[in-house]
Image (cartoon, rainbow, N blue to C red):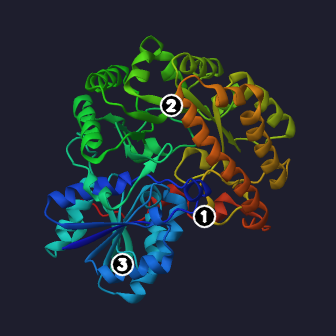
């Protein structure tokens, strides 16, 4: 059985303008068990080449696989693209079975199957074992009703089977790194790069995030085996930069420290980047030197907001004091900090933006990333704000970089202007420019210049996109209207039960 896995193109400006791409880790995770089971698996990374839809469809038809698998880490914004690709494929080929997966399909399985008849199966949740079990059943022409963790149609009605069991041992399934060989994936200034994951899940109940619902439980890989895999990728594939895709890699301080020590003992010249909670940096103050020795050069700190009342409202379980302390600790140990600021948790005013800018300057991060609240239906936040109006109905732009929620006080253009002024103020202030030009660590200096070059391209492109490309709706549409069937109702839809 021939299987083609497709990574659809992502339309986000950051993906298109950076000039660099990372491998689709989730799809490589799915491919590993399939290859080891004897299936012929190929990867078409359409995001890498930014292929047009017609070119993607032509390539799929040319390869004529028995099964077509699609998924993307930018699950919500990528789903319309997946719908378009699969519809065009089905019009040209009726025999190819189409399987999709990801966070968005997991929680929107019913309407996807109802509205897109070309999609045959949806893998809900973690995909390694579920996808293997489903494809094995299809190969032997067995009914899929016994396969846990999938959604499909039974007599024309969308059906979901009971959830699959969580993968207890994350080292059980191999990642198909060999599929990278046809692509030159780079990051951090054209260095060969890969995405890795030490853990899955997050134990914190932030109301805007659905990771704890998707992964259900925080689990980690064996520190020794994970360090061995990084060593293999460096020696066999020449990977220098590792971008950690974890939601919360250092949740368990003991096993995280064990991994750092194991990797340091290998004495590899690696560059590591990732996201981390600010309070975990403060917690690990006594061994932050190990972070640096292991190769970490930058952390994105999920600070989100600089108002204690908002932090409490969104269940961030952090404090303003620790957030600021984490940035100072990282700088002390020669690690760059990137602070996020998420707009839309409330109806901000000009005064709110001004106070946030003052707080950002006080925090003094090396880099800043402004994002917008993207209200996914499966998160607790949705229930709180489903009455709010939205201004953006193009799902392809629900990518955290576009304003989705309407603001009662300010028009969209003024919020956009405030966000751009905050970005340029933070990156062009004298202290930031001095660090950019005179950073003593040569590797960090190169990294900051690389990020600044990309940031300038993105910044100017976002101006053009906002005023000439993005179409804001003038209709009064609430979140509840846009997602017509809240997730709570989805739970009452047909679920296949075990005998």
Q: Considering the numbered disc 1 on the image, is that residue within a helix, a strand or a loop? A: helix
In the rendered image, residue 187, in percent from the top left (x then y), is placed at: 47, 46
Q: Is residue 155 left or right of residue 377?
A: left
Looking at the rendering, which quadrant does residue 96 occupy?
bottom left
For residue 307, say whether it is visible.
Answer: no
Looking at the rendering, which quadrant does residue 288 occupy?
top left
Looking at the rendering, which quadrant does residue 421 occupy?
top right
Residue 297, compared with residue 404, is above or below; it is above
Q: Considering the numbered disc 2 on the image, is that residue within a helix, a strand or a loop? A: helix
Residue topped by disc 1:
395
| Quarter the N terminus occupies | bottom left
For residue 123, say whether it is visible.
Answer: yes
Q: Considering the numbered disc 3 on the image, is that residue within a helix, a strand or a loop? A: helix
Q: Residues within 10 Å of mark 3 (few under 14, many from 20)?
A: many
CA separation in Å, label 3 and label 1: 24 Å
CA separation in Å, label 2 and label 1: 38 Å
> If you read the primary sequence from the N terminus, does the residue marked by circle 2 or circle 1 appear first?
1
| Quarter the C terminus occupies | bottom left
Q: Residues within 10 Å of mark 2 (few under 14, many from 20)?
A: few
Viewer-closest of 33 and 260: 260
Check if mark 2's residue and mark 1's residue have beta carbons within 8 Å. Answer: no
Residue topped by disc 2:
443
Q: Residue at x 42, y 34 (%)?
A: 271
Q: Residues within 10 Å of mark 1 (few under 14, many from 20)?
A: some
Residue 343, compared with residue 277, is above or below; it is below
Check if mark 3's residue and mark 1's residue have beta carbons within 8 Å. Answer: no
Q: Residue at x 74, y 34 (%)?
A: 426
CA separation in Å, label 3 and label 2: 41 Å
Residue 414, compared with residue 206, is above or below; it is below
Residue topped by disc 3:
60
């Amino acid at each position: 059985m021939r299987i083609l896995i497709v990574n659809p193109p992502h339309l986000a400006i950051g993906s298109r303008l950076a000039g660099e791409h990372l491998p689709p880790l989730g799809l490589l995770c799915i491919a590993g068990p399939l290859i080891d089971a004897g299936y012929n698996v190929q990867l078409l990374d359409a995001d890498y080449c930014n292929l047009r839809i017609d070119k993607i469809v032509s390539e799929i038809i040319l390869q004529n696989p028995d099964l077509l698998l699609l998924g993307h880490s930018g699950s919500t914004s990528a789903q319309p693209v997946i719908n378009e690709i699969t519809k065009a494929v089905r019009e040209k080929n009726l025999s190819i079975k189409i399987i999709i997966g990801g966070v968005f399909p997991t929680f929107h399985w019913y309407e996807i199957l109802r509205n897109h008849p070309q999609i045959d199966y949806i893998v809900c949740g973690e995909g390694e074992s579920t996808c293997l079990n489903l494809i094995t059943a299809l190969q032997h022409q067995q009914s899929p009703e016994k396969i846990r963790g999938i959604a499909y149609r039974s007599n024309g009605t969308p059906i979901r089977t009971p959830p699959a069991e969580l993968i207890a041992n994350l080292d059980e399934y191999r990642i198909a790194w060999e599929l990278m060989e046809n692509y030159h994936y780079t990051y951090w200034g054209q260095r060969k790069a890969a995405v890795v994951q030490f853990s899955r899940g997050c134990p914190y109940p932030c109301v805007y995030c659905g990771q704890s619902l998707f992964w259900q439980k925080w689990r980690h890989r064996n520190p020794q085996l994970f360090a061995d895999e990084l060593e293999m990728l460096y020696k066999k594939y020449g990977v220098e930069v590792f971008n950690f895709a974890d939601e919360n890699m250092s949740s368990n301080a003991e096993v995280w420290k064990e991994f750092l020590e194991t990797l340091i003992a290998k004495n590899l010249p690696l560059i590591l980047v990732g996201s981390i909670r600010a309070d975990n940096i403060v917690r690990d103050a006594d061994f932050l030197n190990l972070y640096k020795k292991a190769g970490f050069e930058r952390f994105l700190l999920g600070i989100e907001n600089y108002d204690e009342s908002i932090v409490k409202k969104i269940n961030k379980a952090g404090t303003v004091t620790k957030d600021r302390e984490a940035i100072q600790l990282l700088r002390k140990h020669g690690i760059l900090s990137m602070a996020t600021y998420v707009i839309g948790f409330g109806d901000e005013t000009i005064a709110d933006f001004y106070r946030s800018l003052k707080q950002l300057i006080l925090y003094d991060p090396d880099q800043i990333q402004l994002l917008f609240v993207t209200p996914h239906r499966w998160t607790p936040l949705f229930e709180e704000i489903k009455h709010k109006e939205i201004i953006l109905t193009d799902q392809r732009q629900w990518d955290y970089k576009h304003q989705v929620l309407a603001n009662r006080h300010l028009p969209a253009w003024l919020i956009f202007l405030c966000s751009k002024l905050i970005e340029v103020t933070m990156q062009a202030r004298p202290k930031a420019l001095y660090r950019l030009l005179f950073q003593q660590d040569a590797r960090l200096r190169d990294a900051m210049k690389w990020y600044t070059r990309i940031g300038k391209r993105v910044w100017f492109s976002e101006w053009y996109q906002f005023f000439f490309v993005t179409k804001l709706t003038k209709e009064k549409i609430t979140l509840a209207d846009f997602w017509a069937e809240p997730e709570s109702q989805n739970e009452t839809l047909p679920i296949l039960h075990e005998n």
